[in-house]
Amino acid sequence: MVLGGLVAAVAATFLLALAVGSVAVPLDETLRVLAGRQPHDPRWTVVVGQIRLPRALTAALAGAALGVAGLQMQTLFRNPLADPYSLGVSSGASLGVALVVAGIGGSGGTFTARVAGSDRFGVVIAGAAGAAVVLAAVLLLANWVRSVVTLLVIGVILGSAVSSVVSLLLTWTAPERAIQYWTWSLGSFAGTSSSDLTVFAPAVGLGLLVALASVKPLNALLLGENYARTLGLRLRRVRAVTLLGASVLAGAVTAFCGPVAFLGIAVPHVARRLLDTADHRVLVPGTLLTGALLALACSIAAQLPGTGLVLPINVITALVGAPIVIAVLLRARVDVAGVG
């Protein structure tokens, strides 16, 4: 029943994301555009079909990807505060984009204009390449490290080191380009075009398929690595596949949308509360739907319906995610006190 309710809520929120914005589009006109029919006002075809539909699809895919990746990381590391960016994938993508910012400039136009135009795919490739380099380093270290806690610490340190390189690089970059980089770092679902979705959607789909195929190993890991090993689970292989799947999801979102914060850490906790289960056979699809729902809601809020203003998506996700993270910390403290 909860999963069915989530499906209905995602569908309703998706339609709402298409209908509201700086200019409201009647729901019947929105449905006409989705059905491929000509609306009464030709402008709605452009507004809904070319602007809002790619944005809504991007938000739903990004939310699902970050939510599932966060669930994988929290299960693998047995840490409720782990998120898809714990291993430095976001920092690697940011380094790739920072290198592009440092190399773009002059009279050819601003960075934001280039990102929105013909050079956007190059920026996406740079972000994906940076994430891939950090992922390769983490997977290499995973073969030498037996403890997942040690791997998590190494990932956090590696991410901090890469972020320091990004900061150093930006100090040598023209101020206007550095400002444009920080604008990118605030995240956005609005910059993805229909052609971008032909790459973004398959990448997210691949990562989600990996997550769905690994529900049994993830369930075994809930009871500890020793128990999983007695079941014949090859822990190194499971660890590598889980890290690869989560990193592909996080890297794809970062490359196309920027480092979207808080969804990866908050969504799994919301899904667990809604579904009241730790079974990944239910929790993975539930987290997928919850992530899509929250990301769509944040996308709507970021557009400030009825106004011409747009907020960075990380502003909204922080306002939604921060109370959830605080609640998790307080609940953990209460549980520890109760045990003591």
Image (cartoon, rainbow, N blue to C red):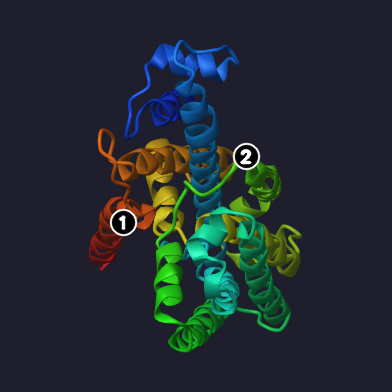
Q: Secondary structure at mark 2?
A: helix
* 59 w.r.t. 242: above or below: above
Whole-percent x, y for residue 196 in the image: 64, 47
- Residue 31 is situated, as x and y percent measured from the top left of the image, at 49, 15
Vertical position of residue 53 compared to residue 303: above or below: above
Q: Nearer the viewer, mark 1 or mark 2?
A: 2
Who is closer to the viewer here, 228 or 295?
Answer: 295
Can residue 223 be seen here? The reply is no
The foreground one among 128 and 180 is 180
Which residue type does callout 2 highlight? Ser
- Compared with 177, 210 (above or below) is above
Residue 200 seen in this snapshot: yes
Residue drawn at point x = 49 percent, y = 40 percent: 55
Place residue 276 in its image quadrant. Answer: top left
Label 2 neighbourhood size at 10 Å, few (<14), some (14-19), many (20+)? some
What x and y, as percent, mark residue 340?
25, 68
Which is nearer the N-term, disc 1 or disc 2? 2
Quadrant (top left, top right, bottom left, bottom right) of the N terminus: top left
Q: Quadrant of residue 228?
A: bottom right
Q: Are marks 1 and 2 in contact (CB under 8 Å)?
A: no
Mark 1 surroundings within 10 Å by alpha-carbon count, few (fewer than 14), some (14 through 19), many (20 or more): some
Decide: is 20 above or below 320: above
Amino acid type at image mark 1: Val
Tell me the residue that label 1 is attached to.
315
The residue identified by callout 2 is 194
* Front-lying residue, 129 or 100: 100
Numbered mark located on residue 23 in the image: none
Q: Residue at x 57, y 63 (%)?
A: 76
Q: Is residue 85 left or right of residue 201?
A: left
Secondary structure category for the residue under label 1: helix
- Spot occupied by residue 102 in the image (x, y as percentages of width and height): 55, 79
Image label count? 2
